[in-house]
Image (spheres, helix red, strand yellow):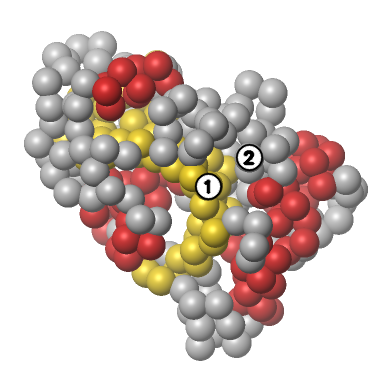
Amino acid sequence: MTDSISADELAGSLDIGAGMLIALVGGGGKTTLGHQLVRSLGPSSVLTTTTRMGARQTGGLDVIDLSTDALPDRVHNPTMIHAGLRDGKARGVTPQWCDEQMAAALCDTMIVEADGARHRPFKAPADHEPVIPSSSDLVVSVIGADALGRVIADNCFRPLRVAAVAGVSPWQRLSPAIAADVLCSDRGGGRNVPRGARRHVVVTKVPAPDDDSAQRDLVDELAARLTGRLDVTLVEWHEPAEMAGLDPHPL
């Protein structure tokens, strides 16, 4: 059985250090993951998006709205930054803005939600996705454990893309083998990854090791299939109290 960790251990597992820009792509709870990371990375850390995120989903972070607030030279508390509100959603910044602010040392670390999945635990990107800043040091592909073993068409975002990348029917179940192939593909989890960026897969909502369930077996098989292809971390997910009751990510 593959070892799993708690969410508050994730930053250390991903070997995130000062000066790094991390892009989150895929499905499986990227917004909650981003909040957990930015709170654990020290005071000078930023969470932002190049797509959209729920306007109410601040998770207790300081908030800077670039359409109304002045941007400081440097942030000194964990901070969420967006480019204004539209239809109740927080608009994303450009990937170039992320590159520029990291070069200007706005913060020690920046977490960028670079993809949307409309609440689904797994996806393959469309032609215009994901929107990853070119200076990203690490791209994390996220998949929810609850995606495994379920019918692709019923449970994945852009299911026809998932099926096409893997060369299977959208009416098949998402096996660990299919998920691993999509995560490793340049048309899947590897799409738009900048040259030189490190890649990592995070599986969220993983059953505890003592949970002798079929779902845990599927997660372990996925980890085994990714071994030698991509680094993978399994996270036993418990929603932080700061996120409880907030609207889920709208994409």
The answer to which of 162 and 95 lies nearer the viewer is 95
Q: Position of residue 198 (x, y in %)?
A: 49, 45
Query: Residue 11: which numbered mark, if any?
Result: none
Q: Are marks 1 and 2 in contact (CB under 8 Å)?
A: yes
Q: In the rendered view, does 34 fall on the left or right side of 241?
A: right
Q: Residue at x 26, y 38 (%)?
A: 19
The label on residue 199 is 1
Q: Is residue 88 above or below residue 147?
A: above
Q: Secondary structure at mark 1?
A: strand
Q: Amino acid at mark 2?
A: Gly
Rounded to the nearest whole Å, what is the CA distance between mark 1 and mark 2? 8 Å
Q: Is residue 148 above or below residue 220?
A: above
The answer to which of 138 and 164 lies nearer the viewer is 138
* Amino acid under disc 1: Arg
List the single residue furthest toward the top: 67
204 in relation to 106, above or below: below
Disc 2 target residue:
190
Q: How many marks?
A: 2
Q: Residue at x 71, y 55 (%)?
A: 179
Q: Give residue 244's quadrant in the image.
A: bottom left
Helix, strand, or loop for circle 2? loop
Q: Measuring from the top left, give residue 9's x and y in whole percent.
A: 32, 65
